[in-house]
Amino acid sequence: MVTPSSVVYGDATMADASPHNTYFNGLRNALDKAGVAWPSVVIDRARMRRNAVRLKALIAPGTRLRLVEKSLPVPALLEDAMQLTGTRALMVFHEPQLRQVVQWFPDSDLLMGKPMPVRAAWHFYQHLSHTAFDPARQLQWLIDTPARLQEYLELACNLGIKLRINFEIDVGLHRGGAANPAALCVMLDQLRGVPKHLEFSGLMGYDAHVGKLPALLESRNTSFSKAVDAYRSFQAVVRDEYSELVSAVCWNGAGSPTIVLHRHNSPLNEVSAGSVLLKPLEFDIDLLSDFEPAVFVSTPVLKAQDGTRLPGPGWISKLLYGRRAHRARSYFIYGGGWPAEAVSPPGLVPNKYFGLSFNQSILNGTRKYSLAVNDTVFFRPYQSEGTLLHYGPVRIFDDGCMVDEWLPFGEV
């Protein structure tokens, strides 16, 4: 088993004449050789592939994995992940990315991960370029209310098409969707009357709340059991009262934080995950302890100084920082203000008194891991979905080198 410390920090051995350990020193050297001297996202391809093997092993027999596209919004990364995990099913959350996905992956099976404004759906059909992708067979729209279902019915009638409809159900997250089986029945009755334009394709119940409450209020196991029971109550109504609609139905749910729990005693025939392949910081939870962080943000040090000096009278800096070892050095870095935490060298912390800067953030650290101008700082992002889109080409690290650059999806 991979230990948490080795997963996060790699080999703990400090490289000679470097503030980084052996792992991050290897990343730094590879970036230097590639001539990268600005903020960049780095994906460790070997770690990602090992994570894919671990993820595949968690999927229960007879259950399909649906990869979450927003967590892996890079076409080459998605293709790699689909091949490694043996799935062509994706969950998509953004209309511009939906149009690109159907061009890149015309053989994919798509489920929208949130209810889209009907105008976004209209835009998709109006701007659907020539492709082998067939929305009538390969795309499920997520619907949360009777009003939205009526809007989508009108869209289908106006365009003369048939839409596959997946209903969002509330299994405890309380972020919308059918609140109970009776509310689901209202929408199923609407759908049942218009088979020419709407086709029932399944249910989606997201359980991201499981494990988030303090254990004193409710244990993870209790939250999971409640979510499973809720899901089964919705399923029972569909099977008992709308059996004519049930054919190759998608019972979707889970997510990276709960996918381990759905290995057993799950009502799902399909689970969703994506972030776990890269394991950003928010996924450092016990259920995912075997997975390795595989995505980092790197940036150069622009300025390195002894001590910490704030604008204004010198005594203020002495009062706040005098003799504080963890503030012995100050570094102004290229960019900053990211939803991420510095992880190498160890002990770097942002300076709250200087305030937020997206141009030249300041970090403080000890003399033990002292940096110089042109050295590199590595961050772990909290999430992958908001990180991979905003730094240009993603750098791919493998076998000690930067072996490729993968462009993320753009706005079209």
Image (cartoon, rainbow, N blue to C red):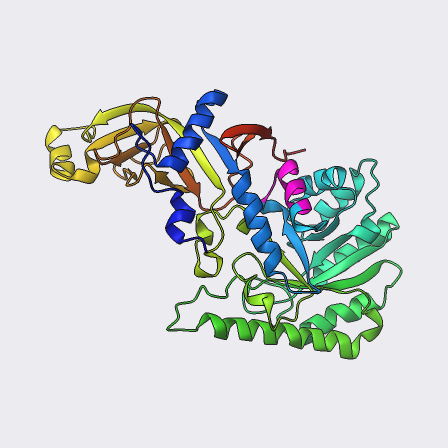
Q: Tell me if residue 359 comes above or below residue 200 in the rendering.
A: above
Q: Is residue 309 left or right of residue 197?
A: left
Q: Where residue 82 appears, x then y in whole percent? A: 67, 46
User: Do we see residue 337 in this rendering?
Assistant: no
Q: Which quarter of the rendered picture does the C terminus lie within?
A: top right
Per the image, is 244 magenta? no
Q: Where residue 253 appears, x then y in whole percent? A: 63, 62
Number of numbered markers: 0
Residue occupying image coordinates x 23% and y 25%: 305
Q: Nearest the camera: 52 or 363?
A: 52
Residue 235 in which image quadrant: bottom right
Residue occupying image coordinates x 73% and y 71%: 186
Per the image, is 81 magenta? yes
Q: Nearest the camera: 296 or 350?
A: 296
Q: Tell me if residue 367 comes above or below residue 34 in the rendering.
A: below
User: Do we see residue 67 in this rendering?
Assistant: yes
Majority secondary structure of magenta residues? helix
Residue 246 in which image quadrant: bottom right
Q: Where residue 283 appears, x then y in whole percent? A: 47, 53
Residue occupying image coordinates x 60% and y 76%: 229
Q: Where residue 132 appears, x then y in whole percent? A: 84, 41
Residue 201 in which image quadrant: bottom right
Q: Is residue 11 left or right of residue 322?
A: right
Residue occupying image coordinates x 52% and y 33%: 399
Region in magenta = 72-83
Q: Nearest the camera: 134 or 316?
A: 134
Q: Is residue 289 left or right of residue 237?
A: left
